[in-house]
Image (spheres, helix red, strand yellow):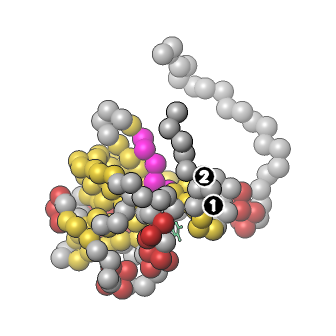
Amino acid sequence: MRDLPDAMPLPVAIAHPVHDPADYRKALSCFATGVTVVSTHWQGEDWGMTCNSFSSVSLEPRLVLWNIRKAASSLEAFVRSGGFVVSVLSQAQKPLVRQFSQGDMASRFANVPIQRGEAQRPRLVEALAWFDCQLHQLVDAGDHHIVIGEVVAFNCHDAEALVFWRSQLGRIASSPTAS
Ligand SMILES: Cc1cc2nc3c(=O)[nH]c(=O)nc-3n(C[C@H](O)[C@H](O)[C@H](O)COP(=O)(O)O)c2cc1C
């Protein structure tokens, strides 16, 4: 790849400055994502929250990221435990989106089958895929932190994907065909 100059010129034309936070959130919601539950084990307790900011960063080393609100009650657990699991939710796990976005930790994990991996971190059994990670880097970013993890174990299963788009949960209309 060619060398990039140290200072890249930034595009300056912003056609419609966005003032209304609701409009801004609506525009962001046009980007379809999957939904995950990120979880960890800290001070003898399981911690977890619904998260759709998950993304892959690097293949070698295997790095993934997600963003956590600085005000989240589980922030300290995710930072101090030294690792986390990302469980990618399947259609069958749709009710967990709400369950893991509110309430105390005991009610979030109530009746949810889990298995434990590295450092007792819980992963959700019916997940489409899971990634067990060691905390690699925490990046300060506005009202969130970007949490970067190095994947130490992972697995995936054949199940139907859960999709989040325009603040609604849905499914992929047609199954992808092999090419
Ligand atoms: C679909 C969906 C995606 C979410 N994604 C994120 C996310 O990427 N980062 C985040 O900090 N919160 C996200 N949240 C909100 C958290 O799940 C929620 O604020 C958190 O569980 C509340 O816990 P607290 O009471 O400990 O702050 C999401 C919620 C939903 C419903």
Which numbered marker is on residue 130?
A: none
- Kindly identify which residue carries mark 2: 174
Residue for point 34% across, 52% down: 156
The kind of residue on which mark 1 rests is Trp
Q: Residue 94 at x, y = what percent?
A: 49, 72
In the image, what residue occupies the spot 79% across and 51% down? 17
Q: Decide: is 17 above or below 87.
A: above
**Residue 77: image x %, image y %?**
29, 69
Image coords of residue 107 (percent x, y): 36, 85
Residue 120 location in percent, x, y? 17, 66
Of residues 26 and 32, the one nearer the viewer is: 32
Magenta-highlighted residues: 51-57
How busy is the neighbourhood of tag 2: few (under 14 within 10 Å), some, or many (20 plus)?
A: few
Q: Is residue 138 visible?
A: no
Q: Nearer the viewer, residue 142 or 65?
A: 65
The answer to whether residue 128 is left or right of residue 28 is left
- Residue farthest along the right direction in this orientation: 15
Instruction: Determine the residue positioned at 36% across, 35% down.
Output: 59
Q: Amino acid at mark 2?
A: Ser
Residue 165, numbered label? 1
Q: Secondary structure at mark 2?
A: loop
Mark pair 1, 2: CA separation: 16 Å
- Within the magenta stretch, is there residue 86? no
Q: Residue at x 24, y 58 (%)?
A: 82
